Amino acid sequence: MAPVTERTTGPIVAAAATISIALISYCFYYNKSDTKTTNSKKKKTSKPKPSKKGLVDAIGNTPLIRINSLSDATGCEILGKCEFLNPGGSVKDRVAVKIIEEALESGKLSQGGVVTEGSAGSTAISLATVAPSYRCKCHVVIPDDAAIEKSQILEALGATVERVRPVSITHTDHYVNIARRRAIEANEFASKHRKADCFDGKEPEQINDYGPDETKQSSIFSSDCTGGFFADQFENLANFRAHYDGTGPEIWEQTGDRLDAFVAAAGTGGTVAGVSRFLQEKNRNIKCFLVDPPGSSLFNKVTRGVMYTKEEAEGKRLKNPFDTITEGIGINRLTQNFMMAKLDGAFRGTDREAVEMSRFLLKNDGLFLGSSSAMNCVGAVRVAESLGPGHTIVTILCDNGMRHLSKFYDAKYLSQYDLTPTATGLEFLDIK
């Protein structure tokens, strides 16, 4: 029996040793795993707490994407800064935050105050979006030829809206000038601590046959109103600074030393000025360009040094400030913001090119863009053609098409101006 015992003891001892090693390995592994988990938990708890700014922290740092169809067609890297991904849906969110924060810091605006603005849409929407974050309200005066959905968005955001007929900026009843007056009225109301409406109990004046809504006025200029502040997006250099301090540096970081050119249209001029000045201070070899819609004088100013359009030179007077279906871009005067721009040249874009470009990008890239964004992409292709293949070009995708459904994306509206899109490719830009 002894031999049998000797034979069985060896395997048993070996098995026991194997099990012991396995148990030790098991314990070591899970102890190590627990340590990793504990360390991981420690790392998570050491993360900084979320900022208390809320919505405002989501503004900026937008992605820079390759627009594949245009890049492949031109041989350049054409990149779009996706500003439509800001919370308020446009590049103007940056401007709204800068304007309000600077006004609060300077004491020109206080919590409980009313921010007023004359806007064709996007800036007003951004102001209405961010104003509650600063415990302020928003009152907007908008031209009645702007897409109706913009007014609807503003009202949904809690702003009060006055729609007025478009007139020359020199007219006292231009929507910008009316907005300026509303801020003065709010300040007068606050200084008197009135509990009636801000029009001193009188009937509100008729403005181009449009009277302000008394219910809305009283809801804005309430008894606890602390005053008014006119945002003045065209002349307020906070607009320029928003892009010089934010958009420009972001583009620089996202492209590194690969950037050759930047192009954008201008309305107030803040975007093209802030970005162009920052980029050229970083690298003088970066070329910056303007793309301008029909009727605007900025193309002439950049290329010829004079501010006039062909129609004005012939002594004609346009019914509207500029003859284009695009919104938010084009102007017939120099603003304080635009004068800060550093530009190397300009291109003229047409309404047809903008319409066709918007449909081309929707079909080929899935990009549903607004009219100014489409015009910017027209400009990007023009720059690519000018510089030749192998260059990197950045433009701004200002907003998406949701705010342009009743005009820019409406077949019936476009047919009235013979702008029904028909292109199958980029032949509208002479690219086959």
Image: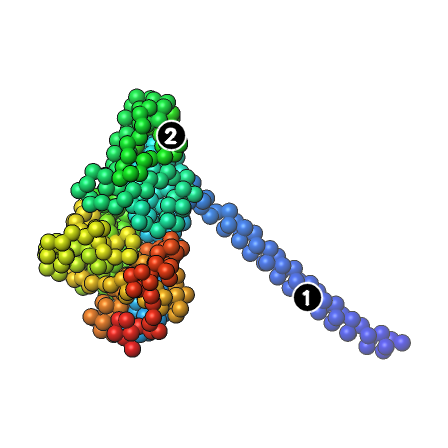
Q: What label does residue 22 carry, if any?
A: 1
The front one of 372 and 314 is 314
Q: Earlier in the sequence, mark 2 or mark 1?
A: 1
C-alpha span from label 2 to label 1: 79 Å
Viewed as shown, does residue 296 lie left or right of 402?
left
**At x 59% / y 58%, what residue is drawn?**
33
The answer to whether 114 is drawn above or below residue 414 in the figure is: above
On the rendered structure, is 211 left or right of 14? Answer: left
Asked if residue 61 can be seen in this view, the reply is: no
Image location (x, y in percent) of residue 342? 17, 56
Q: In the rendered view of the protein, which quadrant contains the N terminus? A: bottom right
* Numbered circles on residues, count: 2
Q: Is residue 233 above or below residue 295?
A: above
* Residue 345 visible from this viewpoint: yes
Secondary structure, mark 1, is helix
Q: Which mark is residue 233?
A: none
Q: Is residue 338 above or below residue 112?
A: below
Q: Amino acid at mark 2?
A: Ser
Q: Nearer the viewer, mark 2 or mark 1?
A: 2
Give the quadrant of residue 76: bottom left
State the residue position of label 2: 218
Instruction: Looking at the picture, tell me which residue is in the foreground, 307 or 14.
Output: 307
- Amino acid type, callout 1: Ala
Residue at x-position 28% and y-position 52%: 328
Circles 2 and 1 in contact, beta carbons < 8 Å: no
Give the x, y percent position of residue 164: 29, 42
Q: Residues within 10 Å of mark 1 (few under 14, many from 20)?
A: few
- Mark 2 closeness class: few <14, some 14–19, many ≥20 residues within 10 Å: some
Question: 258 and 140: which one is in front?
Answer: 140
Residue at 28% x, 66% y is 353
Colour scheme used in the picture? Answer: rainbow
Residue 29, position as x, y percentages in the image: 61, 61
